[in-house]
Image (spheres, rainbow, N blue to C red):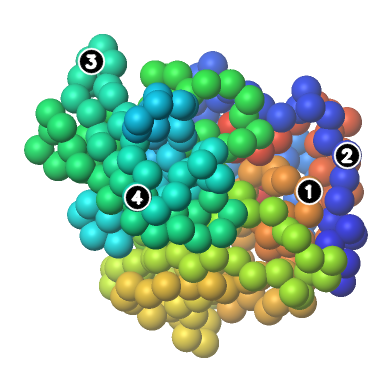
Amino acid sequence: MRVDDFDFDLPATLIAQHPPAIRGASRLMVLSRATGASLETRIDALPDRLRRGDVLVLNDTRVFPARLVGRRLPGGGRLECLLVAPRSHDLWEALVHPGQRLRVGSRFVCEGAGRAGGAIHGEIVERGSFGQRLVRLAAEGFDTVDAAVDGIGHVPLPPYIRRPDADADRERYQTVFGAYRGSVAAPTAGLHFTPALLERIRAAGVEIVTLTHHVGYGTFKPVRVDLVEEHHVDPERYTVPQVTADAIAAARAGGRRIVVVGTTTTRALESAASGSDVRAGTATTTLFIHPGYRFRVVDALLTNFHVPRSSLLFLVSAFAGRDHVLAAYREAMARGFRFYSYGDAMFIE
């Protein structure tokens, strides 16, 4: 299957640059997997789409302010460093810009301002390709490197959000149920939920459970091949608690649905699948879901509207069918739905 088969033209005006003024005010498109029929409603109507006995699975990862902005030493030229994955408490895999000027031994500093103060000192210790580096960090004015990153770092907004991050993004680019720090991108389907909506879902007889899937920068990795099957996704870590695995097993035994919030949650559950149940534990996944994949766990999916030619669009198309998804996307564009991370949602059942 060709990557070009998943392309579409999206007006720039439909790429959400800010979250809705009020969390939970998003629109919702409901799509039938069987027929491709769609209808428009609001995210606060989601409880009406769920059934008593459903198990709703959320990703409780938390985004950390992984984007560091500073200056090179000596000379003072501007530098950006995106922390991608820790090797130890002070050693990080990172993407740096401008990469061609940062060789092994290059040093930089990122200084806090206003409320934060302090600084992060960095040194390039290993060089990779496409701007990838291994950097060693040291904190000044903070007890730990993690504390310094939390105080000085910027919210790592996606590249299609073409504005500087703001203080409000520290709250809004984060789910209300996030618990475990480790993602450089938000599990965006979860951004629509409020405590009140979660309570209404519970009151409707739906069981809510969580897993942790830390989202890496590979979620924005462009597809550089012509054939979908030749693409590879970067490894990401996930943890499925025993209580979540047990809830899914009980639901399966009782003929009840597993309703999944987000593509990361989907990949974690399908990676942990053992028959129609899932194994509890922590593992790394490189599972690439694309059309032709047979889902073993997921019965319904809440997700956002995704980038053309992306691995996330491939996953959604595998679940609902490419023609159904692209037809729904065309309808969403005609109706002025907002796309991508801060945009509206789609519920596929």
Q: Residues within 10 Å of mark 2 (few under 14, many from 20)?
A: few
Answer whether residue 48 is visible to the viewer in this image: no
Q: Secondary structure at mark 3?
A: loop
Tell me the mark number nearer the camera, choosing from 2 and 3: 3
**Residue 211, percent across and down?**
37, 61
Question: Which circle's residue, 3 or 4, is located before the other in the chain?
Answer: 4
**Residue 95, percent across and down?**
48, 48
Question: Which circle's residue, 4 or 1, is located before the other in the chain?
Answer: 4
Give above or below for 133 relative to 82: below
Tell me the mark number nearer the camera, choosing from 4 and 2: 4
**Residue 252, percent across and down?**
49, 77
Question: Which circle's residue, 1 or 2, is located before the other in the chain?
Answer: 2
* Residue extending farthest bottom: 275
Label pair 4/2, CB-CB below 8 angstroms: no
Amino acid type assigned to the residue bearing label 3 in the image: Arg
The residue that mark 4 highlights is 105
Q: CA distance from mark 1 to mark 2?
A: 8 Å
Can you tell which quarter of the image residue 321 is in? bottom right
Q: CA distance from mark 3 to mark 1?
A: 39 Å
Label pair 1/2, CB-CB below 8 angstroms: yes
